[in-house]
Image (tube, rainbow, N blue to C red):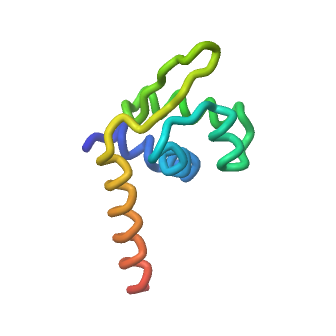
Amino acid sequence: MNDRLYKCLSSGNRRRILYCIGEEAKCVNEISDCLDLEQSLVSHHLKELVNCGLIEKERDGKKIYYRVSESEIIDLLEKGKELGDKLEERC
């Protein structure tokens, strides 16, 4: 893994966005509603996630839909959560 990927995943909002679109592609409005975040903030994070290669976008008429680029990304998030929980139990 590279530093760029870790930096991109360091944001809690970005991880939440990845979980939100993990099962199906969604547009900005749907993601904003899903996470109860401002649309402008979601758009900013989506741009960063696209730049990191974690998500892809596809235009359908006037709407742009975002989806996770690789299924392993959600697996990585899940493993990280499991490890974090395990380490937290030790403290």
Say left or right for 9 vs 17: left
Q: Which residue is drawn at 54% across and 48% down?
A: 20
Say left or right for 68 vs 33: left
Of all residues, the one furthest to the left in this rendering is 1
Name the foreground residue: 62 vs 6. Answer: 62
Residue 65: x %, y % from top left: 54, 27
Say left or right for 27 vs 50: right
Of all residues, the one furthest to the bottom in this rendering is 90
Say left or right for 20 vs 70: right
Q: Residue at x 55, y 18 (%)?
A: 60
Name the quadrant of the C terminus.
bottom left
Q: Which residue is drawn at 74% across and 39% down?
A: 38
Q: Residue at x 42, y 33 (%)?
A: 55
Name the foreground residue: 32 vs 40. Answer: 32
Residue 68: x %, y % from top left: 41, 38
Q: In this view, does 1 lie above or below 75?
A: above
Residue 12: x %, y % from top left: 55, 53
Residue 24: x %, y % from top left: 48, 41
